């Protein structure tokens, strides 16, 4: 059949474009932006220095193998460099995996409140996303295994998950892997792995090392404070690394990204401070929310999922409007099937306090909330 206009591949018009957390508000004045899980600490000074040094060579193509960065990652985790692949954010790596292993007729599984980049990557390759339910906002291994069919080619889980903040222990990840056919790629997205303090957690290194169908992805966008530079990496079985290397852009990371990333991963002291801060303030925020009568899903990441009462006056959209009137921006989660929750990134101590003060004001029954006409623009 011919068409009178260019026609994209099937599946592409089924994609809802990804809507990032709000980063701007109208009107003047600073905002407290806790909508995108960015770190309040910025990047390591060593990474910033390396980035500035890179300014001297902007006329040159970068090293297409990202050698310096892969070497720094391999030294940090004791991994074979040939199994590490860097990408322009882990988003690129998730898309490369889908490009390589998914096509029309295939299915890929992700979880009910899973990261929205997964269904985009799945549909962009003509494959069908299959959603497994979660239990208590947590990945449910049995629910995933029930969805496996002969068409299944890939399973994506974020562990810890975003936007719920929950994780599954390593023995559950192993049980998931054992239940999958050998031709299914299990993608373990460890974007928040650095934040987890739990003895039963493992991001996936061991499982990748011992199998040929598991990939772990990681990012420099969160605890390393380099979201703007777009740096991610994957630890893969050699065969999968070889496949992805064939289809990636030949210069997929910029030289400033390679140099800043390599310096960042060496600054362990900086990361340790961010980890410690996040843990303390995540617990503080969770407790304070509970004191206000707001339920919080237990989180191991740098964010918390706050559930609002169903009562019209106190629902999440009203809370979001109220916070925005105070120039505080959290993340609305309608597109994650969590319309009555907001996700709050753990920011600086001052930002956490200001946000909890505002939430206390919002939840105060004696406080007359102005009934906002209409809602702020819907924001996934
Ligand atoms: C933030 C995040 C990422 C990181 O994406 P980048 O492209 O590396 O910035 C990956 N997965 C999840 C679940 C995330 O929340």
Image: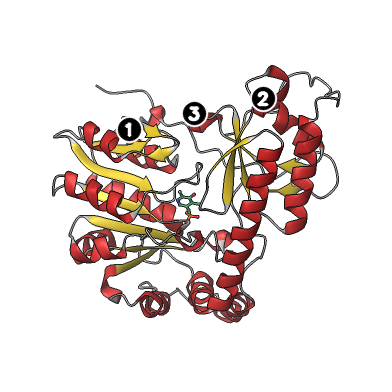
Q: Nearer the viewer, residue 153 or 305?
A: 305
Q: On screen, 323 above or below 337?
A: below
Q: How many marks?
A: 3
Q: Of residues 183 and 157, which is closer to you in this image? A: 157
Point out the frontmost of discs 3 and 2: 2
Q: Secondary structure at mark 1?
A: strand
Nearer-the-camera pick, 259 or 64: 259
- Residue 337 numbered mark, or none: 3
Left or right, 42 with respect to 202, comes to right
Above or below residue 121? Residue 191 is below
Mark 1 close to ligand 1, CB under 8 Å: no
| Quarter occupied by the C terminus | top right
Local packing at callout 3 (Cα closer than 10 Å; few below 14, some 14-19, many 20+) is few
| Residue at screen point 48% across, 76% down | 262
Tell me the distance, in whole angstroms, between the alpha carbons under discs 3 and 2: 15 Å
Q: Are marks 3 and 2 in contact (CB under 8 Å)?
A: no
Q: Secondary structure at mark 3?
A: loop
Residue 372 at x, y percent in the picture:
79, 21
Among the two numbered marks 3 and 1 on one chain, the one whose residue lies closer to the N terminus: 1
Report crowding for label 2: few under 14, some 14 to 19, many 20 or more residues within 10 A (C-alpha): some
Residue 85 visible, this angle: yes
Picture quadrant of residue 310: top right
| Left-right relation of 5 to 254 | left
> How far separated are the C-alphas under marks 3 and 1?
13 Å
**Does dot 2 land on a helix, a strand or a loop?**
loop
Residue position for label 1 = 132
The residue sitting at 70% across, 33% down in the picture is 320
Q: Are marks 3 and 1 in contact (CB under 8 Å)?
A: no
At x 13%, y 35%, the residue is 150
Residue 287's x, y, as percent? 65, 46
Q: Which residue is identified by label 2? A: 315
Tell me which residue sits at (78%, 32%) in the image.
Answer: 362
């Amino acid at each position: 059949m011919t068409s009178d206009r260019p026609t994209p591949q099937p599946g592409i018009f089924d994609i809802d474009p990804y809507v990032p957390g709000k980063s701007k508000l109208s009107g003047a004045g600073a905002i407290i932006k806790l909508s995108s899980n960015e770190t309040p600490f910025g990047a390591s000074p060593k990474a910033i220095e390396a980035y500035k040094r890179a300014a001297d060579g902007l006329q040159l193509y970068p090293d297409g193998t990202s050698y310096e960065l892969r070497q720094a990652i391999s030294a940090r985790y004791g991994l074979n460099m040939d199994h590490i692949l860097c990408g322009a954010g882990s988003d690129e790596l998730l898309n490369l995996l889908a490009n390589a292993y998914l096509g029309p007729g295939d299915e890929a599984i992700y979880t009910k409140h899973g990261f929205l980049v997964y269904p985009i990557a799945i549909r962009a390759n003509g494959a069908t996303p299959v959603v497994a339910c979660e239990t208590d906002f947590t990945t449910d291994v049995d629910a995933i295994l029930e969805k496996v069919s002969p068409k299944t080619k890939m399973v994506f889980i974020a562990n810890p998950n975003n936007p719920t903040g929950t994780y599954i222990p390593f023995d559950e990840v192993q049980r998931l892997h054992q239940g999958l056919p050998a031709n299914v790629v299990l993608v373990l997205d460890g974007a928040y792995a650095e934040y987890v303090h739990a003895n039963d957690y493992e991001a996936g290194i061991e499982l990748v090392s011992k199998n040929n169908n598991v990939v772990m992805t990681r990012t420099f966008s969160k605890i390393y404070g380099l979201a703007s530079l777009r740096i991610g990496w994957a630890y893969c079985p050699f065969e999968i690394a070889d496949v992805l290397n064939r289809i990636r852009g030949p210069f997929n990371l910029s030289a400033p990204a390679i140099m800043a990333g390599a310096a960042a991963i060496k600054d362990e002291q900086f990361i340790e401070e961010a980890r410690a801060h996040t843990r303390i303030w995540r617990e503080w925020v969770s407790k304070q929310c509970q004191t206000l009568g707001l339920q919080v899903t237990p989180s191991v990441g740098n964010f918390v999922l706050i559930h609002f009462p169903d009562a019209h006056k106190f629902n999440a959209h009203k809370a979001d409007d109220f916070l925005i009137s105070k120039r505080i921006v959290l993340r609305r989660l309608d597109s994650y099937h969590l319309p009555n929750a907001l996700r709050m990134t753990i920011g600086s101590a001052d930002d956490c306090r200001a946000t909890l003060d505002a939430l206390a004001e919002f939840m105060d029954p004696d406080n007359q909330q102005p009934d906002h006409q209409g809602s702020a623009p819907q924001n996934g």
